[in-house]
Image (tube, rainbow, N blue to C red):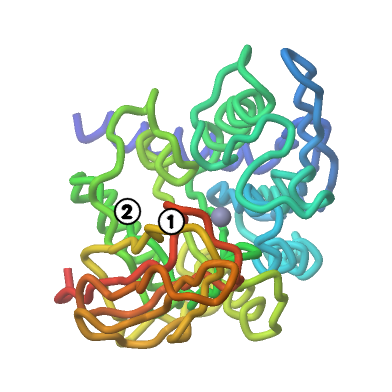
Amino acid sequence: MKHLRVVCIFLSVFSAGLLAQNNFTVGTTTAQPGQKATGFLEVPAGVDAATSIPVAIIHGAKPGPVLALVSGAHGTEYASIIALEKVIQSLDPAHISGTVVVLPLVNIASFEQKVPHVNPADGKSMNRFYPGKPDGTQTERASYLITKQVVERCDYLVDYHGGDLDENLRPYAYWPKSGNPKQDATTREMVLAFGLDHIIVWSDRPKDPNASRYLDNTANTRGKPAIAVEAGYSGTVQPEDVALLVNGTLSLMRYLKMLPGVPAMVEHPVWFGKIDTVASEQPGIFYPLVQRGTYVEQGMKIGYVTDYFGKTIYEAHAPAAGVVLYICGVPSMKKGDTVANIGEITTTP
Ligand SMILES: [Zn+2]
């Protein structure tokens, strides 16, 4: 038995060594070991039009894990997209152990047409229809290909988001708590290594891999530790937001031993156990009264809505004490739209 195990370890090391010598292909992109290559994941036409999703592969000269980095499911969350553009340019395959697969802009139509939240081809959010369907609409076909070609072939995954055109957002990350102690320990370390100090503990995620909905959850339900991170707000590309995401990626790669050096772990994280969404009860013109990142007490007035003659018709109040993770950043308000998300602080999980 002991002898057998030694043989198995030898074989797995040997096969990892062999893998490192192999090319790595996603869609039209093939990278040789020690090489950086770019191409596209071609989503074929179906009930609606075809689309192409850019893919970069940085295939390290040394063996190691496969890390998938995905941004731009929401194509106007610009800071996260620009951050991954910088990551593609800055990573040198000669210094990397393992393979980095980067999808910097999943939702090109959203980006080009400046349409927030959804894919204008089918009106669907590109982070709600995983694991996707080969015969669905464009979002579902794209999600299916990403599941097959990226999620199923990676060892770890990060999904990048931020405040959309209408969201004034303070940077934060999600720790997806699945109930699997080993995987939860890994994702907890990953989220701390990434460096965003406000962290939402997200435990009520779908457990069924066939109904995973979100990209990070699609990876986690397939046994691939994954986290989601958010920085950037209201259509801006602030250097400090981009730096948070780029430096977080490099720190995570150090934690995963894909880059030399030690990760910069968050020392004093603020954990949120519950998120309260405040939705407007009236359509009209929204006026915020607090900024992103503000600590609010229960009942505090955080904004109001007027009709088109200036008369106040709705007041938004914080349902609980917590931190304003984002607040609507534009005057446009429909009934039922999100006014703010408030994170309720919890003890260290
Ligand atoms: Zn997003």
Can see residue 244? yes
Point out which mark residue 176 bears: 2
Please, is residue 203 above or below residue 32 in the view?
below
**Number of disc labels:** 2
Position of residue 18 measured from the top left corner of the image (x, y, whole percent): 62, 36
Can see residue 100? no
**Ligand 1 found in image quarter:** bottom right
- Count residues near mark 1 (Cα–Cα under 10 Å), then give few for <14, some for 14-19, many for 20+: many
- Count residues near mark 2 (Cα–Cα under 10 Å), then give few for <14, some for 14-19, many for 20+: many
Please, is residue 154 above or below residue 87 in the view?
above
Q: Looking at the image, which residue is at 44% across and 86% down?
A: 289
Q: Looking at the image, which residue is at 40% across and 60% down?
A: 280
Position of residue 336 measured from the top left corner of the image (x, y, whole percent): 42, 52
Q: Quadrant of the N terminus?
A: top left
Query: Mark 1 — residue?
Result: 227
- Type of residue at label 1? Ile
- Residue placed most toward the observer, 298 or 314: 314
Quadrant of residue 330 within the rendered picture: bottom right
**Left or right of 216: which side holds 78?**
right
Position of residue 117 measured from the top left corner of the image (x, y, whole percent): 60, 50
Q: Is mark 2 within 8 Å of ligand 1?
A: no
Q: In what element is the residue under mark 1?
A: strand
Compute the Cα span from label 1 to label 2.
7 Å
**Left or right of 331: which side holds 218?**
left
Asked if marks 1 and 2 touch (Cβ < 8 Å), the reply is: yes
Q: Quadrant of the C terminus?
A: bottom left
Q: Looking at the image, which residue is at 72% across and 34% down?
A: 26
Position of residue 272 measured from the top left corner of the image (x, y, whole percent): 26, 70
